[in-house]
Image (tube, rainbow, N blue to C red):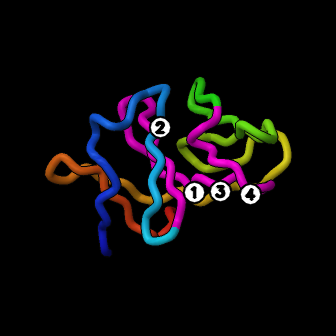
Amino acid sequence: MSWIDVCEPSQVKEDFPFSAKVNDKEIGVYFIDGEYHALEDVCPHAYALLSQGFVEDGLVECPLHAAVFDIKTGRCEGGPGQDIHKYPVRVFENKIQITFLPEE
């Protein structure tokens, strides 16, 4: 499994996810309940970065379409859209890393 550096833990806040382009993919990194989560950052309904949306109670709301996604699972919980990819995350040598093998 190949791990890719995305950011440092200090760059991710509970209410303010970190957005990055990694290997031409938009990725949002979230810190929820003491754990880091990485999701596909583009709303599947139409282009909008989810990391710029409203984060509350483990959910992120698309800033344009009001679709709501569970940060821990990537599941679409309401509004237009479909589930999004969630990527495995680890913290290694003070870097948050992801791999592009989607979690099952």
Name the amino acid type tagged 3. Answer: Ile
| Disc 3 element | loop
The residue carrying mark 3 is 84
In the image, farthest residue toward the left: 93
What is the total number of numbered labels drawn onto the structure image? 4
Contact? badges 1 and 4 (CB < 8 Å): yes
Instruction: Find the distance from the CA under tag 1 to the CA under tag 3.
Output: 6 Å
Closer-to-camera residue (16/30) = 16
Q: Tell which circle, 1 or 3, labels the residue nearer the N-terminal end.
A: 1
Magenta segment range?
25-53
Q: Of marks 4 and 2, which one's residue comes earlier in the chain?
A: 2
Name the amino acid type tagged 1.
Answer: Glu
Q: Amino acid at mark 2?
A: Pro
- The kind of residue tagged 4 is Pro
The spot of residue 74 in percent (x, y) is 61, 50
Q: How dense is the environment of label 4, judged by Cα within 10 Å: few (below 14), some, or many (20 and up)?
A: some
Q: Residue furthest bottom?
A: 1
The mark nearer the N terminus, 1 or 2, is 2
Q: Are marks 3 and 4 in contact (CB under 8 Å)?
A: yes
Spatial CA distance of label 4 from label 2 is 18 Å
Secondary structure state at the residue bearing disc 1: strand
> Which secondary structure lies at badge 2?
loop
User: Label 2: which residue?
Assistant: 17
Q: Nearer the viewer, residue 41 or 70?
A: 41
User: In the displayed structure, would residue 58 be above or below residue 42?
Assistant: above
